[in-house]
Amino acid sequence: MEARIPESHRDIILGKNFAHVATLMPDGSPQVTPVWIDLDGDTLLFNTAVGRQKDRNLKRNGKVALSVQDQANPYRYIQIRGKVTGFTTDGADAHIDKMAKKYLRLDIYPNRTPTEQRIIYRIQPEHVQAMG
């Protein structure tokens, strides 16, 4: 069942706030990572490197939960449960540069390594709770 990101809290995702993404390890235990977050309509996007733990977890099990807290008011946040609806390396380098512009005000992501391959994950919200 698809859920929508409420207008009242879209600014949290569109702002310079970090998301904390929870994925499931092979044994079912949770793994949480802070990520830069993006929004395409009601679909959440984040970028990581191929082979990282969250990448391996999401390719095995596409269930995900995340929360994004408003830096200006930590009592205002949005939490989302959903599933991976796609992932791609196409355009991922340009996307991480876009995220570097948003979060660091830099035109190019400064932490790229010569051997890493970037990947974009698309998350469809199934349950959304907006607070504050």
Image (tube, helix red, strand yellow):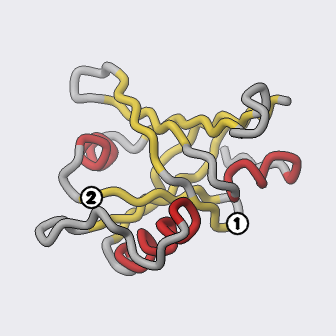
- Towards the viewer: 27 or 101: 101
- Towards the viewer: 14 or 59: 14
Q: Position of residue 31 (x, y in %)?
A: 35, 28
Residue located at (72% from left, 39% from top): 70
Give how far apart the Cα atoms at labels 2 and 1 are. Answer: 24 Å
Residue under label 1: 41
Q: Position of residue 84 (x, y in %)?
A: 46, 51
Is 63 left or right of 29, judged from the image as shown? right
- The numbered mark, 2 or 1, whose residue comes first in the sequence reads 1
Disc 2 on helix, strand or loop?
strand
Residue located at (68% from left, 49% from top): 2
Disc ID at residue 68: none
Under mark 1, the amino acid is: Gly
Residue under label 2: 49
Neighbor class of circle 2 (other Cα within 10 Å; few <14, some 14-19, many 20+) is: some
- Between marks 2 and 1 in the image, the one whose residue lies nearer the viewer: 2
